[in-house]
Image: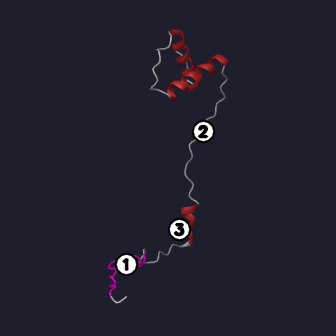
Amino acid sequence: MPTFKRVSLAGSEELFRPTRPQVVTDTDDVIRETVDRHEKVKEVVLRTLSFTPDEIELLLEAIQTAKYPDRPRAKPQLDKFDSLDALRVKVQGETAD
């Protein structure tokens, strides 16, 4: 194949250039300090809530409404709206006014 011409790959030396020109020499103390760093953890307060079957049904309906907000729905009746608000207060742990 005498007619085959090779093209020089300009820039291919960039592929083989070392990514870190200088070797980083961290001492064991610096590495250990970084690995063993303890961050302050926010204290988690756990609560147990008890729900009636009606409240669970109301929660399931609210989850469906939140999951599919584009579906047309009628506004909840006033008593159901009050029940939803009472349930919100119960879940958030606020005191009812």
**Numbered disc 3: secondary structure:** helix
In magenta segment, residue 8: yes
Question: In terms of depth relative to the viewer, which is nearer, 65 or 81?
Answer: 65
Q: Amino acid at mark 1?
A: Ser
Name which residue lies at 37% across and 78% down: 12
User: Magenta part of the protein: which range?
Assistant: 3-18
Residue indicated by mark 2: 44
**Numbered disc 2: secondary structure:** loop
In magenta segment, residue 72: no
Instruction: Measure the C-alpha gap from mark 2 to mark 3.
Output: 31 Å
Name which residue lies at 55% across and 52% down: 39
Which quarter of the picture shows residue 14? bottom left
Mark 2 vs mark 1: in front? 1
- Image marks 2 and 3: residues in contact by CB distance under 8 Å: no
Question: In terms of depth relative to the viewer, which is nearer, 30 or 17?
Answer: 17
Residue indicated by mark 3: 30
| Majority SS type along the magenta span | loop
Name which residue lies at 58% across and 66% down: 32
Residue indicated by mark 1: 12
Q: Residue furthest bottom?
A: 2
Instruction: Measure the C-alpha gap from mark 2 to mark 1.
Output: 54 Å
